[in-house]
């Protein structure tokens, strides 16, 4: 296998709650330019400012930028804040089974009110062994599409055991195009989530609803790249720390949720050269802790909850505590509220009137920030004593969180990253702390070095035919990685998970295969 070179220069961008960071890395993964700008309410303003600052720092070398990778919270914020979401017609193909719990039964009512244009349960779906539950209710689907015509901007269809047998989902997508036209997009469960009907259905509906939200970001990123005359492809970071092309993100925006923690872990791995460690990413509002295993984020066994909705998306195993650089120090407690991106105007060291954890760290000499003399006038107030002890609150919670994520291991260092990484003491619960150079932009570094991934989940027989079925699953995962922009000569399967299924008439195994590969310089592909 011949490895072709990765893009000559790559720019990684991470949009955080307080700051938007951008870095440029060369083909040897060396950081050659960086910038940090305040995150704006519309997200795209801060992204543009950070990108433009890095391009200015590169000067003539900006012409060598071949890829721009973005990790963004835009999709997450849209769900949490209930804004910029599409109206979705929801189709569950399950009758006459799987009717005990209605679609979206556990959704918060305010979110459902923003998203749902209508719900239908129609006949169809398959058993795990491939036998149809019932013929697809084609006429019922057509009636429903007629009912939501003009109101639904997208259709989400989820069929029983759709990831294994997607035929009915694909047929509904054909009906949507025929009845509603190409302007109404279809989100299909077998392309979004894993097995497990309810959580997969939730993920599929969220994916359909997030089209407008992610469209704002993909359009803005493409415009910034074009405005600067860059001959560069745009990519988005996914939940699992891998990349997908902007066009793929436009089709599957739900896969961008949770990219931030994955990027910080991957960035910490590169900056320290460590493959196994605990990573503490300290932002303006929270400290997120994750674990590196062989250079990648340890994945969570449970799906994540987004805006009150349970999903089954692949996510890093992250524990968050409500302490960050902007955490407000009250007279009786520390946090959990934060001044967040307003820290430069509200914190005491910047001339504000709100005591924060950053003020406490500056007072204790942990960080050099603003003007420490501005704190002096507050030491005799009721907040004075709390400023001196609030770091103890943080240290105690941090040590407890580290003990939880470490699973009792004491041989792992804690890598401190993030804009407020200076809050972390030199040791945490017996674990030494490492502070790599450029730790404050580790998330953007992680985005810039992300690999391109593809994943496939299926059900295979436990006996004869297992090897052939796994080979087919491996090929599908590799094909998906290549379709998302991976170098065909560099893709490899990095994980195969097999879980015996305890139901069904045959001995079956649920298999999940993940493949990853490096980006390739488009110029090399053309040669």
Image (cartoon, grey):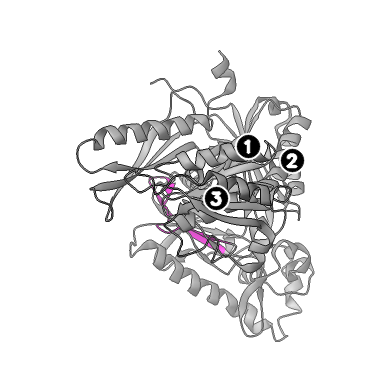
Answer above or below: position of 460 versus 393.
Answer: above
The residue tagged 2 is: 220
Which mark, by number, is residue 13?
none
Q: Residue at x 69, y 27 (%)?
A: 61
Q: Residue 383 at what x, y percent from top left?
A: 69, 82
- Between label 3 and label 2, give the one nearer the viewer: 3
Give the magenta-colored segment's residue range: 287-306
Quadrant where the C terminus is found in the figure:
top right
Front one among 10 and 73: 73
Q: Quadrant of residue 503?
A: bottom left
The residue tagged 3 is: 204
Q: Residue 223 at what x, y percent from top left?
A: 76, 35
Marks 1/3: CA–CA distance: 18 Å
Q: Residues within 10 Å of mark 3 (few under 14, many from 20)?
A: many
Answer above or below: position of 35 versus 395.
Answer: above
Q: Residue 522 at what x, y percent from top left?
A: 58, 22
First reached walking from the N terminus: tag 1 or tag 3: 1
Marks 3/2: CA–CA distance: 25 Å
Q: Residue at x 53, y 34 (%)?
A: 29
User: As drawn, which residue projects farthest toward the top?
Assistant: 527
Q: Residue at x 66, y 28 (%)?
A: 232
Kind of element beneath mark 2:
helix
User: As drawn, which residue projects farthest toward the front?
Assistant: 139
Q: Residues within 10 Å of mark 2 (few under 14, many from 20)?
A: some
Q: Residue 380 at what x, y percent from top left?
A: 72, 85
Left/right placement of residue 392 relative to residue 466 reads: right
Front one among 101 and 357: 101
């Amino acid at each position: 296998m011949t490895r072709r070179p990765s893009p000559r220069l790559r720019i990684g961008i991470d949009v955080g709650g307080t700051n938007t960071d951008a870095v440029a890395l060369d083909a040897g993964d060396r950081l050659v330019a960086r910038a940090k700008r305040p995150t704006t309410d519309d997200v795209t303003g801060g992204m543009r400012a950070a990108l433009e600052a890095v391009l200015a720092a590169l000067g003539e070398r900006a012409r060598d930028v071949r890829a721009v990778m973005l990790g963004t919270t835009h999709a997450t914020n849209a769900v949490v804040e209930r804004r910029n979401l599409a109206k979705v017609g929801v189709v569950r193909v399950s009758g006459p089974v799987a009717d005990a719990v209605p679609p979206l039964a556990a959704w918060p009512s305010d979110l459902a009110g923003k998203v749902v244009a209508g719900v239908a349960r129609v006949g169809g779906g398959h058993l795990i062994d491939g036998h149809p539950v019932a013929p697809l209710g084609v006429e019922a689907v057509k009636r429903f599409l007629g009912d939501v015509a003009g109101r639904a901007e997208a259709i989400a269809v989820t069929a029983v055991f759709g990831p294994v047998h997607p035929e009915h989902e694909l047929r509904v997508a054909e009906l949507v195009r025929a009845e509603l036209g190409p302007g109404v997009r279809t989100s299909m469960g077998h392309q979004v989530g894993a097995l497990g009907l309810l959580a997969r259905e939730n993920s599929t509906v969220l994916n359909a609803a997030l089209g407008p939200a992610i469209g704002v970001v993909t359009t803005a990123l493409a415009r910034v790249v074009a405005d600067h005359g860059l001959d560069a492809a745009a990519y988005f970071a996914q939940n699992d720390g891998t990349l997908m092309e902007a066009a793929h993100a436009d089709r599957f925006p739900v896969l961008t949720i949770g990219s931030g923690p994955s990027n910080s872990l991957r960035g910490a791995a590169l900056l320290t050269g460590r493959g196994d460690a605990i990573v503490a990413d300290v932002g303006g509002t929270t400290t997120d802790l994750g674990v590196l295993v062989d250079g990648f984020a340890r994945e969570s066994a449970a799906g994540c909850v987004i805006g009150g909705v349970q999903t089954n998306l692949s996510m890093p195993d992250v524990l968050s505590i409500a302490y960050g650089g902007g955490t407000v120090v009250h007279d009786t407690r520390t946090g959990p509220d934060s001044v967040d991106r307003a820290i430069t105007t509200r914190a005491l060291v910047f001339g504000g009137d709100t005591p924060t954890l950053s003020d406490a760290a500056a007072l204790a000499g942990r960080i050099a920030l603003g003007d420490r003399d501005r704190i002096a006038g507050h030491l005799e107030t009721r907040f004075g004593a709390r400023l001196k002890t609030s770091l103890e609150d943080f240290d105690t919670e941090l040590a407890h969180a580290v003990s939880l994520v470490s699973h009792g291991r004491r041989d792992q260092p804690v890598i401190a990253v993030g804009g407020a990484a200076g809050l972390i003491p030199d040791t945490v619960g017996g674990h030494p702390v490492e502070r790599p150079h450029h730790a404050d932009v580790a998330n953007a570094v992680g985005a810039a070095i992300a690999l391109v991934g593809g994943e496939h989940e299926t059900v295979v027989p436990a006996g004869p035919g297992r090897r052939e079925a796994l080979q087919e699953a491996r090929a599908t995962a590799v094909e998906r990685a290549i379709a998302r922009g991976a170098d065909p000569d560099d893709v490899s399967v990095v994980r195969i998970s097999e879980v015996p299924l305890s139901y069904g008439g045959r001995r079956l195994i649920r298999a999940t295969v993940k493949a990853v590969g490096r980006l390739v310089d488009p110029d090399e592909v053309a040669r």
